[in-house]
Amino acid sequence: MCQSCLSWYARCIAPYLVHAGCSANAFAHMRKRMIPRAEGIVVEVGFGSGLNLPYYDPARVERLVGIDPDGTMLGLAEPKSRSLPFDIECLRACGESLPLTDDFADTVVVTYAFCTILDPDAALTEIQRILRPTGRLIFIEHGLAEGPRCRRWQERLNRPWGSLAGGCHLNRDPLRLIRGAGFHLVEEERGRFPLPFWQLGSHYAGVAAPR
């Protein structure tokens, strides 16, 4: 596929495919469990099309700042944002360079985004910077499978999958990335996706604290 076609696909097709895929029950189930725990001033890195919005607890959230580099995805989120009872601000920016001050957030939420961020180490450094010392990172991710057979297929599929799925990497290890950035994993869990999503490997979720 030519470069111009890839660019058109990334702007006009991929955001809608990612939105549809990430709306599946396999993802919604984990969002429902983890997102209500966010509190105070919340920053969501990889805000996308706002699929987490229905799961925030209005009694716990003071303000929400959504960060995403994709204008199409933010446009999909806008109608949902208007109906919520707390203040929401959406910023078009990359996770590697968050336009926020130090110690800004009580909670940072990242869901299914470390797979697409170009430099997840830099993004995690930024998350450390904007989190208050008592703050928490809540994450839900997919990544490297436990079984060697699935891992081999993830490596084979990684490049074509990324071209189709908005730059998503199948072979990243989110727990290793989070630990490597200096976070302390307060809670962590790992599960399996249902068969239609086998290529996504393991399903990770947890809470991490800055050191």
Image: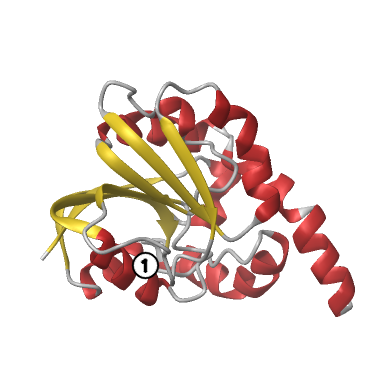
Q: Quadrant of residue 183?
A: bottom left
Report the coloring of the rendering: secondary structure
Quadrant the C terminus occupies: bottom left
At a point 36% along the width and 67% down the height, the residue shown is 173
Q: Position of residue 167 (x, y in %)?
A: 62, 67
- Identified at 62% across, 36% down, the residue is 78
> What residue sits 33% from the left and 24% below the top?
57
- Check disc 1 and report the residue beneath it: 173
Q: Is residue 79 above or below residue 208?
A: above
The amino acid type found where label 1 is placed reads: Asp
Q: Nearer the viewer, residue 120 or 198?
A: 120
Q: Is residue 149 above or below residue 48?
A: below
Left or right: 5 with respect to 31? right
Between residues 42 and 140, which one lies in front from this camera angle?
A: 42
Count of residue discs: 1
Measured as percent of width and height from the top left, residue 101 is found at 30, 62
- Expressed as whole percent of the image width and height from the top left, the position of residue 87 reads 42, 32
Can residue 1 be seen here? Answer: no
- Can residue 46 be seen? yes
Q: Estimate the x, y position of residue 133 in percent, counting from the top left.
A: 11, 57
141 versus 31 height, above or below: below
Given residues 195 and 11, the one toward you in this image is 11
Task: Tell me where residue 16 sits by quadrant.
Answer: top right
Give the crowd class for mark 1: few <14, some 14-19, many >=20 residues within 10 Å. Answer: some
> Which quadrant of the rendered structure holds the N terminus?
bottom right
The residue at the point 47 percent across, 52 percent down is 112
Q: For this view, does 208 lie left or right of residue 11?
A: left
Nearest to the observer: residue 52 or residue 197: 52
Q: Secondary structure at mark 1?
A: loop
Q: Quadrant of residue 180?
A: bottom left
Left of 30 or right of it: where is 128? left
